[in-house]
Amino acid sequence: HDKEFFKRKENDFLVALLADSFGMGVVPYDFNFVSVAETALQKKLSDRFQRIAIHNFGIPSIGMREYAYLLTTEVLQFCPNLVLLCVFVGNDIGGGFDSKNSRQCFQGWFVWTVANRVLALLGEVSRGKGMVPIGEPMEKTLVTKGSPLPSYLFDNSLELPTFSKEAFLHIESSRLEICNPHNSSTARKFEEFFKVLQYIENLLKEKLLVVLIPDQFQVDNLLYDRILQTKDRPKQYIRNYPQERIIEYCLLHHIPVLDLLQPLILAEKEGKTYHLRDTHWNTHGNRVAGEAISSSIFLKCQKR
């Protein structure tokens, strides 16, 4: 979901970005947080470099093992100055892999995950739960150049939901388990996550910047309260537990990390940052994330 990639030359500044469906942005291309960050960087660094770009390697539904696979098979050949590893805490934690068998892991992921998600979407539509047609989320990203922009991009009160209330609450409630340190699977998921992160860090060294993408329940107070009501032991949950664990690891291993939680919490006070019952950022959320990322990269350049 980007312009044609190029290999970095001496006078270029190139960033590669690994992400899941957040890389797609679920908004028109120019409003995607990657595009926002790239445009801001081009303005800030135009006096220092001939070409400035962020290559967007975002692919929907992937996670840590696929990020590692893409890094070794595609990203490194473009010789980027910096690689942004965008970790969505909602479902990127876990998913360990055997680096010697990463190709098979990636192929196995594709058939199972895509089939699962298509069946889930069809199930929502067949039950008539009020979800928008399957084509609607894609229409949010594919806007013909020169055509009028949909009004819901600027007024979220006009937006149709992607999922029914029941389905959306189920998704967010299941994701909250990563914030439960008492859950036996949570420790195992973090162990798998840190193994892959270590593998990636060993490849990139100082070229790595970890970007933490929060889940909506960490930003939306009403949603968080609603989810806690579905739990038998709500006091077991620590809302920002994933960020605490990952930041602690990154500080210990001297890995630069950008946490988008606080910028999005502040932005939420001005207006919604996520699409209506969708789990992805709207234009407001994408803009906030893109500006925070461009500022972080610019500061990193200033230190060189």
Image (spheres, grey):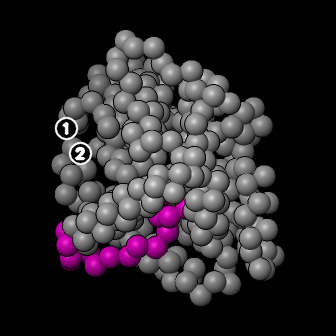
Compute the Cα span from label 1 to label 2.
6 Å
Identity of the residue furthest to the bottom in this view: 184
Please tell me in which quadrant of the rendered image residue 284 appears. Answer: top right
Element carrying mark 1: loop
Horizontal arrangement in the rendering, residue 182 relative to residue 11 (left or right)? right
Q: Residue 269's x, y, as percent? A: 77, 37
Residue located 37% across and 52% down the image: 60
Residue 5 seen in the figure: yes
Residue located 41% across and 33% down the image: 139
Horizontal arrangement in the rendering, residue 250 relative to residue 207 (left or right)? right
Horizontal arrangement in the rendering, residue 195 relative to residue 238 (left or right)? left
- What residue does disc 1 label? 7
* 261 shown above or below 141: below
Residue nearer the viewer, 35 or 302: 35
Locate the N terminus and report the quarter of the image it occupies. Answer: top left
Q: The magenta stretch spans which residues? A: 87-104
Q: Residue 124's x, y, as percent? A: 49, 56
Q: What amino acid type is highlighted by mark number 2?
A: Cys
- What residue does disc 2 label? 79
Marks 1 and 2 close (CB-CB < 8 Å): yes
Q: Residue 128's x, y, as percent? A: 53, 51
Q: Residue 256's x, y, as percent? A: 51, 54
Local packing at callout 2 (Cα closer than 10 Å; few below 14, some 14-19, many 20+) is some
Horizontal arrangement in the rendering, residue 242 relative to residue 193 (left or right)? right
Residue 86 seen in the figure: no
User: Does 96 appear in magenta?
Assistant: yes
Residue located 57% across and 52% down the image: 129
Residue nearer the viewer, 104 or 78: 104
Local packing at callout 1 (Cα closer than 10 Å; few below 14, some 14-19, many 20+) is few
User: Does 190 appear in magenta?
Assistant: no
Q: What amino acid type is highlighted by mark number 1?
A: Lys
